[in-house]
Amino acid sequence: MKITRLFQRTMFGIFLMFLFIGVSTSVVSIYSVDLHLTAEYEENSRDIAKTIADASVDIILNRDLSSLQSLIDQFVEIQGISYIYIVSDTDEYLAHTFVPGIPESILESDRRVGETVTRNLAGMGDFVEVSSYILAGHVGSVHIGMDVSHVTLAIQKAIGNQIYLIAIIFFVGIFASIWFVSFAAKPVNSLLDYAVALAKRDDKGDSDLSRERILERNDEVGHLARLYQYFFTVADPQKLNRDQAADESK
């Protein structure tokens, strides 16, 4: 499919337009999904922390640490939850899910209950930690860590389908635009061939039917073809002289 140089810039502009739409849509989708899923994971983790905090009040007051450990072991099996630890109001670690022990970075850190904290634990990876007070902080606090890689993987899966759809629309749009532009390019090519034939005074050949079709068109191509015909035939001084000479010879 040949595209004239006149329409090559048009095709390039359409390509850039689709590229801009695809890239901008992808960026917005990635940002929106990332923001939404991250917020959803954090909110779910806070709800779990609140649930553990509400369920552990009596257990902590009764100093039943084995039951407290059993309680948090159930929740750490939830997808996305990597670790849980509970701290008393006196900064004593009552229960945790770390094996073999609590990392030094957590032991040495300042715990900001109620805030989202980003942690990097050596040999374990990156985590986002949320927390909740137990009995308004009078008993202690619950801290839950989410694996960032797990959240990232979930975001990639959610975004993947959207990116595939955008890519399909992009390529289909490019080929469709080439196909539609060819509708305009084909009559222009025919008009160019017609003008060249007129300029060469080529009255023979197998293009009479195509010439008639061009002259019968009721659009800009047809108007230009009839205008060319006028200039090359009716308004051609040489042809007028030839016609006059032919009339005089009769």
Image (cartoon, helix red, strand yellow):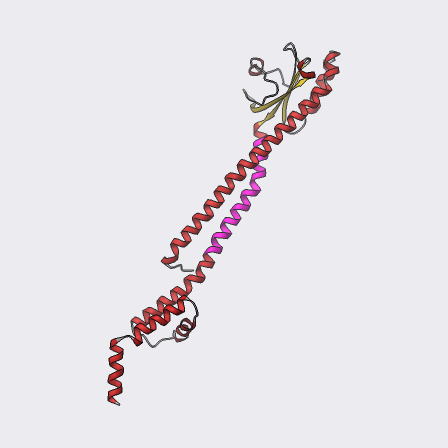
Q: x and y percent of residue 226 in the render?
A: 37, 72
- Placement of 2 over or under 233, stated as above or below: above
Q: In the rendered image, which quarter contains the C terminus?
A: bottom left
Count the labels in the image: 0
Q: Horizontal placement of 50 versus 171: left or right?
A: right
Residue 173 in magenta? yes
Q: Which quadrant of the view contains residue 29?
A: top right
Residue drawn at x 35%, y 68% is 193
Q: Is residue 148 above or below residue 240?
A: above
Q: What residue occupies the far bottom of the structure in this picture?
A: 250
- 95, above or below 190, in the image: above
- The secondary structure that dominates the magenta segment is helix
Q: Residue at x 57, y 35 (%)?
A: 155
Q: Which residues are magenta?
A: 151-177
x and y, in percent, of residue 147 in the image: 59, 26
- Residue extending furthest top? 90
In the rendered structure, the answer to whether residue 73 lies left or right of residue 1 reads right
Side of 174 relative to 143 (left or right): left
Q: Residue 224: x and y, percent?
A: 37, 68
Quadrant of the drawing holding the N terminus? bottom left
| Lateral position of residue 8 relative to residue 97, left or right | left
Is residue 83 magenta-colored?
no
What percent of the width, then of the height, locates residue 151? 59, 31
Closest to the observer, 185 or 221: 221
Q: Quadrant of residue 43?
A: top right
